[in-house]
Amino acid sequence: MKKILSIGFVTGIIGQIIGVAVGIGLLTGIRALMGLAPKTEPAAVLGAVFGVIGFMIGVGGFKDWFAWAKGEDTIEAEEFHDQPGIIRYWGYSLDHKVIGVQYGILSLLLLVLGGTFALIFRAELAQTGIQFISLDFFNTLIGMHGMVLIISILLGISALSNYLVPLLIGARDMAFPRLNAFGFWLAVPASITIVAAIFTGGFDTGWTGYPPLSVRAPLGMQMFFVAVFFAGWSSILGALNLIVTIIRMRAPGMNPFRMPIFVWAVLATSIIALTATQLIGTSFQMVSFQRLFGMGFFDPAKGGNPLLFQHLFWFYSHPAVYVFILPGLGIISELLPVFVRKPLFGYKWVAMSSMGIALVGFLVWAHHMFTSGMEEYLRVPFMYSTLLVAVPTGIKFFSWTATIWQGKMRFATPLLFTLGGIMVFLLGGLTGPPLGTVATDLHLHDTYFVVGHFHDTLFGGYIFPLFAAIYFWYPKITGRRMNETLGKIHFYLMTPSFLVMTFGQMAVGLLGMRRRIADYDPAQGFQTTNLIVTIAAFLIAVSILIFFINLFVSAKKGEPATNNLWESRSPEWAILPSPAPQHNYEKPFSVVGDPYDYGLKDSKFVETAPQQSAD
Amino acid sequence: MVSSFPSAEYKVLMASANPLFRKGLEKMVLGRYGESTTLRATTTTSETLEVMESWQPNLVIVDYDDKSISRAEFLHQFVTGDLPMQVMLVSLQASGAVVVYDRRTLTPAQAQDWLSSPQFLPNPPHSEAQPARRNSSMKHYVFAGVLVLILTVLVDLLLSVTRLLPVQASLQAQPIDRLFDIEIIAISFLFSLIAVFIVYSLVVFRRKNGLDEDGAYFKSNNPLEIIWTVIPLGAVIGLSYFGAITLGQTRQADPAPIEIKVVSGQWFWRFEYPEYGIVSDKMYMPVDKQAKLTLTSLDVIHSFWVPEFRVKQDLLPGENLVRELRITPTLVGEYKVRCAEMCGTSHAYMESPVIVVEQADFDAWVQGELAAIGTDPIARGERWAKNNGCQSCHSVDGTVNVGPTWQGLFGKTVELMDGSTAVVDDTYLLNAITNPNMQVQVGAVANVMPQTYKDSISAEQLSDIIAFIKSLQ
């Protein structure tokens, strides 16, 4: 028992339960003292907020900071040592690699959860009529599918960048190890809170939570708001930490244009996350306050405007999709040269295109509002800025093509997922212009065409690269490689299924199937396509099940891979053994060449300083 | 293998008659390749060739400004050797421009460049540019280019013969569909461009005979990058321009349209014809006559969309947020307006008929509607209830729905949310319609019913509706 209670995760959960009780009790108690009847919604919101704080206290997130406040000393992050074995992933660690894996586990858990939601409502959509679930539950599920997967993606990106960035730039850890751990653990109670939304009435708004609908939605809406608020906070802290780490902690000789390309992508992503996430927190908080305190921000009867919400919301939520895809595109650029044995073509252009996408991404938000009834003169300028994103994105595609051109491919699983990512993201990119030009968007807005387009961009820009990255760096974490055969089955099952799914979605969308509908008119002739889409979705689920089997089995039984398995020039392979030791590089390395000079004889990217110790 | 590290000894040979050349580069070379590097210098062509043969340096640095080093002879020696060797051409006059050639990848085109005159690239000294592959891979570009064109035509053909869009039934849909066609061509071309070059490379340049070799070494080409930045930039500006023109065409306003006020609520549509004083739950439109829709919502945001008409516009709550949409139906038929903005529980079912008829049939419908307003308050009440969408939440046959059923409602004693009970009489019903949150029945949810009926339904119509409810025993 005592052993169980020493696990950070367990004490965190206990803290959250206590926090929820305190929050509900406090509000109800104050109201009772004032002679007022108990009120559910404010009590629940305060309970949820206190619950998150309780979790952070319970898990030990404030321990060092409390100690400093009392004037006590704490150990430096450098001296911090984890418990050996799997148990370290369950507690408050300061090691960026442990935190990276923790992020990864939570992200994959939410990926499964969000995917399961999709399977449930896809089963419902397999034929017309309502078969399995109620309308309200369906509506809750689509919103949950969206937001749970958004949080999963944010955490997945944090997993990749936390684990990889210090290794790639030669740092011993992140710039702020405590903030790093705090950022991760904040996401845990946030995830618990969003799941709680299902059990508190759900919400029927989709993930966008537009008022006035979200003002009238059940209590689950408030849990959703609280969860997004804290998940956003976690994302901001992580981004801040990454920016400082990338700017301040690079190895000697690693000037900005010798950074691995993934680091550029993380930098661009982090700038967006640091500067835009506040807006989604604010917009949801304003709806929450409208519900709790009657503040009429978005209520026309009180002088508010529902369109204001959409502007605030999309000012984050559009750049957010670049947060989701830029790291994935970075992974593609990072892995391609290793497997085609050629330099990354136009390194500087690829690096700068990430920054270009990040910059232009801030200027396009109103393309989600072409039919919203915003001021009409805004539509054309936002169409121009939206299509402008095609330019830096095009640079990436052309550079990848030139990188592949005359390459000598090694068809390992990570390369398959990299190529799959390029092709799927290409489809996502090409289905963008009809949505970006206002006239065609008048037809396509809020249809399944958008759903298909969006899944193409996120599978191509995140899911495929994520799998590529996991297959690629798995030996760095475990010292064993994942099974190639299972990896290939995963790829060859998932890719065609996915293409069938999104082509089907886009086809019914063009023909007039609206987003977020629990049922569709048989007269529109969508049944067959919808059935096929549902079958394809389940096949994707099967392929991902194979992936998880591979993931777990290979940890114990995989082929040992302790050396430079992929013959990469990157320091974490060229210098470090697998699994990577705690605190990374014993001696700092220096950068003596370009990162991707594959095919250039006798060139090196990094080298360790010669041994200088006396013995 | 790339991962193989350079041998402990790295041999660099510098060929120049100019002693300053050697001095200037010595430090850079040592710094770059480490202190263990061995340096040798030669001053004439014959000496250089001799040392190359006997000493086998890893790298030869040739002074490009020195005419006493014969390029042709040197090149001959360089390409005939078989050990890995690189040559670096350095010009101190052309502000330190550098060109690097690798013995193993040297192409005839490069050799030609080299012999005629130095192709100094505008790159800084560090970027070892490699203007490789020109003639040798020209045929690949031609093949791939032809394949791109073929695939473009095939994809465009496939997308054109597939029925992608619903029937085109409005004037506004015509320019939109034309823009779709332009975009489909662009999509077909760009897809083919990327897909062909990638797949071609996978197939043609694949590893053969199990050889584990590296790909061709070239890493950047700024003119090419500028080309594929500027051309797409022009293309997107062009596409945006077309998009803006098309948008303008969909918004052209007729001076004398028929006015229809579209009112939406959870989960119904109501269509008001102020010219005729008609309120209907179906939208009748005369064909080939522009309709000016003024759109508003009673509760949350909805979106007016008839897929066959293409255009879509959200309906916002609030008197100051009334929006407008112009539609000219061109094809007689029955369509449906389908709410396209998530609006709560029954969003999927928020559909109402849109009926496009000839002008004569439209006039007949108007006359019929006006005549149908009879003298029986119950019949009128039924009509008002239907037109206001009451039945989307309240059944008249006892079926359980979002709101209480009207069957047997009058005279019933109901339990309210605040714990009290009330008898349903005229006053109760009037309050329930005009101020629905005042008395919420157990089992119903507050705030679901629109609170705007006191303004939007006249007192006479309200009493008709109550009469209708009374009749449902």
Image (cartoon, coloured by chain):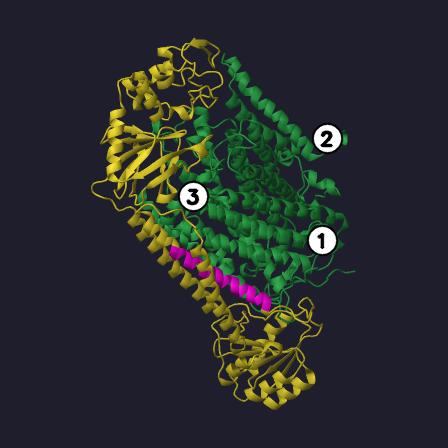
Chain colours: A green, B yellow
Which of the two discs, 3 and 2, labels the residue nearer the N terminus?
2
For the residues labelled 3 and 2, the Cα–Cα distance comes to 55 Å
- At a point 71% along the width and 53% down the height, the residue shown is A483
- At a point 72% along the width and 52% down the height, the residue shown is A579
Which of the two discs, 1 and 3, labels the residue nearer the N terminus?
1
Most extreme residue toward the right is A615
The chain letter for the residue carrying disc 3 is A
Quarter of the image containing the C terminus of chain B?
A: top left
**Is residue A578 positioned above or below A401 on the image?**
above
Q: Tell me the SS state at disc 1.
A: loop
For the residues labelled 2 and 1, the Cα–Cα distance comes to 36 Å
List x then y, in percent, for residue A200: 55, 26
Q: Provide the residue designation for mark 2.
A: A5
Q: Which mark is residue B352?
A: none
Quarter of the image containing the N terminus of chain B?
A: bottom right
Q: Which mark is residue A512?
A: 3
Q: In this orientation, does residue B160 appear? A: yes
Q: In this orientation, does residue B304 appear? A: no
Q: Provide the residue designation for mark 1.
A: A483
Label 3 crowd (10 A; few <14 / some 14-19 / many >=20)? many
Q: Determine whether label 2 and label 1 are within 8 Å by CB.
A: no
Q: Which residues are magenta?
A: B181-203
Q: Tell me the SS state at disc 3.
A: loop
List x then y, in percent, for residue B198: 55, 64
Seen from the viewer's position, the closer of residues B49 and A490 is A490
Label 2 crowd (10 A; few <14 / some 14-19 / many >=20)? few
The chain letter for the residue carrying disc 1 is A
